[in-house]
Image (cartoon, grey):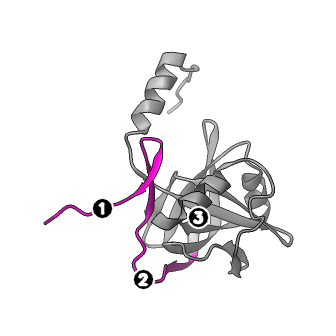
Amino acid sequence: MTTTTQPPDTATLHAFRGTMATVASPVAVVTAMDGERPHGSTVSAFTSLSLTPPMVLVSLDNRSQLLTLIRRAGRFGLNVLGAQQAQLAASFARSGPDKFDGVAWSASEGLPRLPGSAAWIAADVDDYVAAGDHTVLLAHVVNAEPGEGKASPLTYHQRSFGTHTPLAS
């Protein structure tokens, strides 16, 4: 099926942005290596995709330097952030090559891993799908580990960081 897309008007873009702000999203830092130098970027567009085989989906801006590095390496790390890592999420959301300056990290599966995260996933990209101004990465999970303890996840909702609070039973 072929669809023709026309650029949306400003009112539609504004309405869509406001509508999507009502959706609570998990927050992660996607990471990759460029030689010996770690790179990363904050994302809220990621999810599990398949259990058999284990797969995840991540969406990155087409202009992202990280996307270029991942295309070259064919793999990435997914650091699912905990509620205590809002400042880290904000730091990795900005542009620039120095996001890891002063940030503790270790290599896991040859990828940058952030300590204190709610979960860690290492994945090999299977496919890149063009989707508007982003590229969707479909990737096979090669390693998945929950964080230590039961860290509450960091979420993004109404343009603010927060976390999940269970309803009373």
Of callouts 2 and 3, the N-terminal one: 3
Of callouts 1 and 2, the N-terminal one: 2
Kind of residue sitting beneath label 3: Ala
Of the residues tagged 2 and 3, which is closer to the observer? 2
Of the residues tagged 3 and 1, which is closer to the observer? 1
Q: Residue at x 80, y 61 (%)?
A: 72
Q: Which element is circle 3 on?
A: strand
Q: Which residues are magenta?
A: 142-169
Give the Cα separation between the discs numbered 3 and 1: 30 Å
Kind of residue sitting beneath label 2: Gly
Give the Cα separation between the discs numbered 1 and 2: 17 Å
Q: Is residue 47 left or right of residue 137?
A: left
Q: Residue at x 20, y 61 (%)?
A: 167
Q: Which residue is mark 3?
A: 139
Kind of residue sitting beneath label 1: Thr
Q: For the residues labelled 2 and 3, say whether their Cβ atoms are less than 8 Å apart.
A: no
Circle 3: is it few (<14), some (14-19), or many (20+) Cα within 10 Å? Answer: many
Residue 96 is inside the magenta segment: no
Q: Which element is circle 2 on?
A: loop
Residue 61 visible to the viewer: yes
Q: Which residue is mark 1?
A: 165
Give the Cα separation between the discs numbered 2 and 3: 26 Å
Q: Would you place residue 54 above or below residue 64 in this image? A: below
**Percent position of residue 135, x then y:** 63, 47
Q: For the residues labelled 1 and 2, say whether their Cβ atoms are less than 8 Å apart.
A: no
Q: Which residue is mark 2?
A: 149
Q: Residue at x 58, y 68 (%)?
A: 79
Residue 147 is inside the magenta segment: yes
Mark carried by residue 53: none
**Percent position of residue 168, x then y:** 16, 64
**Percent position of residue 145, x then y:** 51, 80
